[in-house]
Structure formats: C-alpha cells, structure tokens
Image: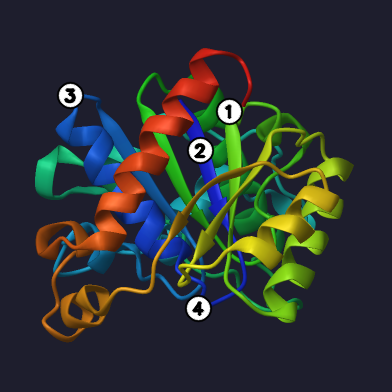
C-alpha cells in the first residue's frame, strides 16, 4: 500500500502522515515513512527525537550514483540500498528516511540530486513491499509520471479556508497531468465540514473523513511527543480514516 499525503503548509498533513504510519505499524504492517517536505517535521510526528541525515546531504553518494561528466546526470541511478544506508527506525518499527532539499539552480548539483530523489521514490513506490507513507510538500514535484501511477492513494489535507481549497485545486491539476486519478481528501481542524465537503464534491474529490480541532495535538507538540502517544479525538478520527482507506483500497475504490 503506497499513500502520498499533500496539502498547504500548516494544514496537518505531517500529523496525519505520522499517525497513519504508526497505526499501520501497530496493526502488524511493515511501514516505511518518507519525509519529502522541505520542512522535515515527520520525525517528530512519528516520535523520533532526531531526524536521520537528509539524503540530499550525502552529496558524494549522490554525485557518484547520479552525476556524469560535463554537467550531465543519470536518470536511473542505483538506489536499492539507499533506504538501509540513510534511514532510521522509530517507535513501532516504522522506518524513516528524509529526502532533504535540493540546492538552488546554478549550483551544479541540482540535476543529479533531483534525478536521484525521483529515482529513489520511484523505486520505493514501485518495488518496496512495505506500506509506504509519503509526507509531501504542498506541490507534488517529487513525483514523476511513472512514480505517481504506483501510488494507491494521494490524500490532500484541507482545512477551512479559501487558500486551502485553492491548494487542492492546484494539486488536482498537477496530479491529473502525471496520471494521479485516485485523489482523496481529509478535512482537518473542524467539526463542521459541510461547506468544504461540498466544494470538494464539486471537484469530484471523495472525503475520507474529518479530523476535529484537538488541543491534545498542541500538547503533543509542546512536549515533543508524537500525537499517537498523547491520544485524543484527532488520533481517534485518524484511526477511522485509516480503516476507511484500507476498505477503499481493498475494494479498488482508491
């Protein structure tokens, strides 16, 4: 099962990603969590005290695997051993890898690093047998056409507000351009999803569930704990979302 989670910054996609990963692991799945967001906060949502070294920081490895003379780069570098080399294992046995950020254009290593990350994601999504949870940035630039087709579901986290809905529209357009047709939504930080759910329905995006505003998430953040280790209504709601997601994938509806 391969699940990508996206949405505007601050909507709660990392909380959803980390909690889903832990819940799947507690049900006996082998779980791989990938932090593809430049903010790199998935470790804390998983209950891991310190991030593993971002993969883009392994500059020599990236250059050896993806670089070529005269500024050229390999589209299919060797990546099958990268997760074991660069990741770490956290609570409930969840494995975590952090993609890191790409250097700005003109630095000479943007293209090899970009090719390396895309090849790694492609390998993880199409070849790994574990449950894979990807915490994406607001866009879906890390995903290419071949990679996106391997994702069982792309979940967009939405909160009440026009900007969040506009981000969903953008992700939907980007996703359609690379073959993502299994787009789902989770509405966060509200007990009254009516208007947002209606707008998502107009866009043809099914809603997996709603996560209520929950002060337990603030307490978890203040004390450096994973949301699942604090509990509360939000974690309970994510448990229901996980169950519905499993059901939809099993039935071929996602």
Mark nearer the N terminus (1 vs 3): 3
**Where is mark 4, residue-wise?**
10
Spatial CA distance of label 4 from label 1 is 24 Å
Answer whether residue 133 is visible to the viewer in this image. yes
* Residue 173, x across and y down, in percent: 86, 53
- Depicted 97 relative to depicted 169: above or below: above
- Depicted 253 relative to depicted 116: above or below: above
Q: Is there CB contact under 8 Å for labels 1 and 2?
A: yes
Q: Residue at x 39, y 53 (%)?
A: 17
* Residue 87, x across and y down, in percent: 27, 48
Q: Is there CB contact under 8 Å for labels 4 and 1?
A: no
Residue sitting nearer the eye, 42 or 84: 42
Q: Secondary structure at mark 1?
A: loop
Q: Residue at x 15, y 50 (%)?
A: 90
**Where is mark 1, residue-wise?**
152
How packed mark 3 is, by other alpha carbons closer than 10 Å (few <14, some 14-19, many 20 or more), is: few
Spatial CA distance of label 4 from label 2 is 19 Å
* Residue 196, x across and y down, in percent: 68, 64
Answer whether residue 97 is visible to the viewer in this image. no
Which label is found at residue 3? 2
**Where is mark 3, residue-wise?**
28
How packed mark 1 is, by other alpha carbons closer than 10 Å (few <14, some 14-19, many 20 or more), is: many
Residue sitting nearer the eye, 103 or 63: 103
Farthest residue to the top: give it. Answer: 251
Rendered image quadrant of residue 20: top left
Spatial CA distance of label 4 from label 3 is 30 Å
Residue sitting nearer the eye, 134 or 121: 134
């Amino acid at each position: 099962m391969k699940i990508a989670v996206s949405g505007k910054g601050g909507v709660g996609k990392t909380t959803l990603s980390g909690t889903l990963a832990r819940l799947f692991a507690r049900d006996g799945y082998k779980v791989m969590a990938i932090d593809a967001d430049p903010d790199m906060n998935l470790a804390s949502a998983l209950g891991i005290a310190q991030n593993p070294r971002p993969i883009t920081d392994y500059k020599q490895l990236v250059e050896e695997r993806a670089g070529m003379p005269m500024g050229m780069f390999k589209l299919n570098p060797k990546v099958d051993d990268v997760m074991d080399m660069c990741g770490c294992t956290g609570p409930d046995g969840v494995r975590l890898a952090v993609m890191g950020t790409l250097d700005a254009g003109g630095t000479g290593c943007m293209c090899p690093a970009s090719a390396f990350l895309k090849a790694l994601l492609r390998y993880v999504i199409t070849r790994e047998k574990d449950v894979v949870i990807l915490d994406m940035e607001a866009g879906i630039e890390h995903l290419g056409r071949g990679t996106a087709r391997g994702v069982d579901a792309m979940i967009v986290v939405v909160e009440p507000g026009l900007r969040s809905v506009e981000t969903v529209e953008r992700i939907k357009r980007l996703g359609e351009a690379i073959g993502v047709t299994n787009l789902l939504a989770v509405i966060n930080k509200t007990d009254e999803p009516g208007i947002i759910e209606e707008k998502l329905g107009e866009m043809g995006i099914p809603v997996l569930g709603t996560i209520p505003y929950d002060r337990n998430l603030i307490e978890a953040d203040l004390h450096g704990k994973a949301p699942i280790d604090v509990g509360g209504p939000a974690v309970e709601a994510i448990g229901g979302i996980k169950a519905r997601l499993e059901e939809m994938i099993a039935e071929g509806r996602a």
